[in-house]
Each structure stands twice: as C-alpha cells, then as structure tokens.
Amino acid sequence: MTTTSTMTATPLAPRRVDPAAVVARTTSRSSVQETWVQVLAMARRALKKMRRKPEQFFDVLIQPLLFTAMFAFIFGGAISGSVSDYLPVLIPGILAQTALTVCMATGVQLREDMDKGVFDRFKSLPIARIAPLAGPMIADLIRYGIASVLTLVTGLVIGYRPGGGVLGCVGGIALTVISGWSLAWIFTWLGTMARSAQSVQGISMMIMFPLTFLSNAFVPAETLPGWLEAFVKVNPVSHVVSAVRDLFNDGAVTAEVGWALVGCVVVVVIFAPLAVRSYSRKM
C-alpha cells in the first residue's frame, strides 16, 4: 500500500516597506557630483539632437565666412584705409558678434523644447533643476568653438596675420567661447519667460544689435560722438572685443581680459539663478 503525500506551497508574505526608511535614504536635492553627471547627460542629449538636425549649424558655418569677408571688403578701405589694416580691428569684433548670435539660438531652441512638452518629462525625473538648462549650454560650447575657429581661418585666408601667435589666438578663442557661454544665460532666461520661440528670437535680436553695433567691434570708440562713446566704454561686449584684440594682435593678457572675465561671472551670477527660477515656475 502506497501512501501519497501532497505538499502545499505556503504563499509568501508580502514585503513590507518602511516609509521612514525610504524617506531617510532620499535626499531633498542632488549633490554637486550628481548634478554634474546629470548636466553631462543632458549635454549628450543635446549633442545627439545636433547630429540629427545638422541645420542647427548653418549659422555657425555660414555666418562667420559671410560676415568676415563682407565687412572686410566693404568697410576696410573706408575705415582703416585698406583691408589689411582693418583686419586686426575687424576679426575680434566678428568673433564677439558671432558668439552673441550663436548663443542667441540657445533661448530659441529651449523655448521650442518647452512648447513641445519635452521639459514636462524632465520635471518628473529626480534630477537637478539646472541640469536641463545647463546641459544644452555645455553642448553649445562646440558650436561657439567652431564659429570662432572659422572666423579666424577666414581672416587668415584674406590676409590677417595675428601678432599674438598661436597662444594668443588660442587664448582669444577661449575667451570668446567663455563669453558666449555666459551671455547664453541671458537668452536662456528669455526662453523661459517668453511665450513662443518667435518672441524669444525677436527680443534676442533687439538685444544683440545694440550690444554688438554700439560697441568698439567695428569702429574705434574715439570716432563716435561723446554720449555714444560713453555707452560703448561700459558695454560688456566692448571689453570682450578689446581683450580678444590684445590677445590676437599682441599676445598680451591685459586688464581688459580681467574685466571681460569679471563681466562673464557677473552675467552668470545674475541670470543663471533667474533662468532656473523661471524654469521651475513655468514647469
């Protein structure tokens, strides 16, 4: 006689989660290291977006070539007597104008992403609020660098010979990239405030043209009327242009370089918190 025993499985008790333990392991904000990792992740996303949309590089590739050649041959003889004499004045000015124009696109693209609902997804992620803003700006450093190098190369092709040598040129390009990155925070803030990408572009153009053309980028400040010369001397773009000229033409790190860097720090300190606060409120 065979006896068959039936074994019944005992159901597992559900795992209990201690809410207090979960809260204890959760931090209220990301650490500096975590924030940096999140910013780099957003920068990689922006780089992939640039690769899939190469039209974003049109202003970076075409504008430096067009503006450098056009301004040199049209205004060179009228302002400095010849194109070769005007190039040491023009090339640093074109660098500042190009950086300002390229960083203007940062606010426009930000507004487009916000309108498409991309940032609604970012809001649900446990990431620092500054990461979706700073990440694309880190990626834009590549665009600033390309535009600056193309401007310098165009100048070399048409006869510019910088007296500062390689180190002076590298320093001038680095300062231009830093200035573009800092000024981009202004347009990032506008991107979070405006209602549409078209509005951001219109407001940015109203800012870009006075800052660029009411500076010493294309003509010496001494040739301007007294009231306009006073504005040009306090214009932050003028300090950047003067600093780049000193680096390119003489290879000298002058006080203008220090003032330009101080201006960049001031812009970031003011507009980076404004952009993050406005972004948090909008989202």
Image (spheres, helix red, strand yellow):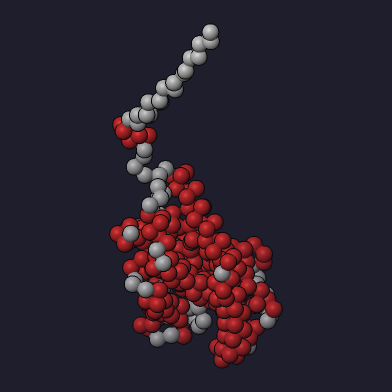
Left or right of 275? Residue 80 is: right
Residue 85 higher or lower than 28, as above or below: below
Residue 176 higher or lower than 209, as above or below: above
Q: What residue lies at 42% left-to-right and 43% top-to-bottom? A: 31
Q: Residue 245: horizontal and vertical position, in percent?
A: 56, 71
Given residues 254 and 281, the one toward you in this image is 281
- Regarding residue 247, the answer to whether it shows in the image is no
Q: What residue lies at 40% left-to-right and 77% top-to-bottom? A: 198
Q: Residue 145: horizontal and vertical position, in percent?
A: 58, 66
Residue 223 higher or lower than 263, as above or below: below
- Most extreme residue toward the front is 1
- Most extreme residue toward the top is 1
Left or right of 178? Residue 31 is: left
Q: Residue 38: horizontal and vertical position, in percent?
A: 47, 50
Given residues 64 and 91, the one toward you in this image is 64
Given residues 220 and 114, the one toward you in this image is 114
In the rendered image, the quadrant that contains the C terminus is: bottom left
Q: What residue lies at 64% left-to-right and 77% top-to-bottom? A: 155
